[in-house]
Amino acid sequence: MDAWVAIDFETANGSRASACSVAAVRVENGKEADSYATLIRPPAGHDRFEFRNTQIHGIRQRDVFGAPTWRQAWSQLRDLIGDAPLVAHNAAFDTSVIRGANAAVGIEAPSVRYACTLVIARRTWELDSYTLPRVARAAGIAFGDHHRAEADARAAANVLLAEQREHAVDSLDGLLDAARVQWGRIHSSGYDGCRKY
């Protein structure tokens, strides 16, 4: 079974540990099988909401009052992810949020593979920009609410499915092979980037 989880994070400030929103969409054999989304109270010491970030996503300090902590949100995410690899648009950012927030609360970094729809898009379409809205448009995906985690995670999932169609494959492994892109990995000693080869 081809299964993977598209994720998207928003952060409260410039710290990669400052996760304030997350969404995840689990895809199995080309269909959405499950999803999870929540606001998050960023870890202590990383919980300042900066104007620039709030301007981007609209989330304020008061919005996360009573929201799950990172530890609680990560527990839910881990259950959804299971052994599946992750997918994200600009995955270097989203996977660094996982590593940063886990480190901030004393949770060991997970061992997980990931693929980046932005890197794959550069092997799929000739575009003047590879932002998520531009790639979604190239893929024929209706997309609004950019920088809302739920919308961005769903868009990344649909972009990955469109990339599979463009390369005439039906698995994530097959897509990476066809696009000549290597898996990224998070592990206990750091990470290896998802990049072209």
Image (cartoon, rainbow, N blue to C red):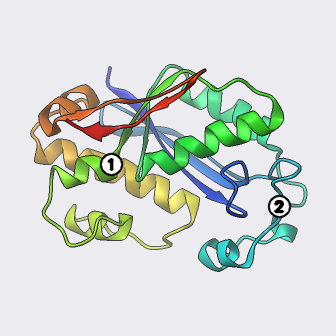
On the rendered structure, is 34 left or right of 108? left
Q: Of the numbered discs in the image, which one, if any, rests on residue 64?
A: 2
Q: Position of residue 88 (x, y in %)?
A: 43, 47
Rendered-image quadrant of the N terminus: top left
* Amino acid at pointer 1: Thr
SS at badge 1: helix
On the rendered structure, is 18 left or right of 152? right
Residues at badges 2 and 1 in contact (C-beta under 8 Å)? no
Rendered-image quadrant of the C terminus: top left
Q: Position of residue 11 (x, y in %)?
A: 67, 59
Q: Nearer the viewer, mark 2 or mark 1?
A: 1
Residue assigned mark 1: 117
* Amino acid at pointer 2: Val
Q: Residue at the location (42% across, 52% down)?
A: 90
Q: Position of residue 58 (x, y in %)?
A: 68, 75
Q: Residue at the location (40% across, 57% down)?
A: 155
What whole-number distance in Å separates the C-alpha atoms at marks 2 and 1? 29 Å
- Find the residue positioned furthest to the left: 168
Residue 170 lies, with reference to residue 35, above or below; the image says above
On the rendered structure, is 163 left or right of 32? left
Res. 40 in view: yes
SS at badge 2: helix
Give the total of numbered labels: 2
Q: Residue at the location (62% across, 72% down)?
A: 57
